[in-house]
């Protein structure tokens, strides 16, 4: 049984079958973002991780995701703020009704 791949790089790289019996310690992989080839030596994924820090397509994808997350967080904060105000207003009206002051 082959070992389970636990590194996060396998979400961003695809391994190609080289069928080279003399270089079993080398793996030929391709970046799923920019389609660049890389060679991983003796199971180390460090080179692939370094590639992701320099890959323009991957970096722009990360930047776009961060911008969307910031907008989502701002929307959530806005909704919470206005939701609290609505709740406070409703509670105030209910208290006024109970006091008969409305």
Image (cartoon, helix red, strand yellow):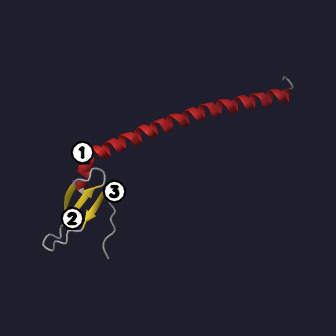
Residue at image coords 23%, 50%: 51
Residue at image coords 30%, 51%: 33
| Residue 44 appears in the rendering | no
Label 3 to label 1: alpha-carbon separation? 16 Å
Callouts 3 and 1 close, C-beta under 8 Å: no
Q: Which quadrant of the view contains residue 88?
A: top right
The disc placed on residue 27 is 2
Task: Give percent across and percent down for residue 55.
Answer: 26, 46
Q: Is residue 30 above or below residue 81?
A: below
Residue at image coords 75%, 28%: 92
Q: Which quadrant of the view contains residue 22?
A: bottom left
Q: Secondary structure at mark 3?
A: helix
Q: Residue furthest right?
A: 100
Relative to 69, 45 lies left or right: left
Q: Secondary structure at mark 1?
A: helix
Q: Quadrant of the N terminus?
A: bottom left
Task: Give percent across and percent down for residue 75.
Answer: 53, 35
The disc placed on residue 54 is 1
- The tag earlier along the polypeptide, 3 or 1, is 3
Q: Residues within 10 Å of mark 1 (few under 14, many from 20)?
A: few
């Amino acid at each position: 049984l082959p070992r389970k791949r636990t590194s996060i790089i396998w979400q961003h790289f695809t391994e190609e079958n080289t069928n080279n019996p003399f270089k079993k310690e080398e793996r030929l992989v391709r970046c799923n973002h920019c389609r660049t080839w890389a060679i991983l030596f003796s199971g180390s994924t460090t080179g692939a991780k370094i590639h992701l820090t320099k890959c323009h397509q991957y970096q722009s994808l990360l930047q776009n995701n961060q911008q969307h997350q910031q907008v989502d967080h701002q929307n959530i904060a806005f909704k919470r703020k206005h939701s609290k105000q609505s709740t406070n207003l409703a509670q105030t009206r209910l208290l006024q009704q109970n006091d008969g002051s409305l």
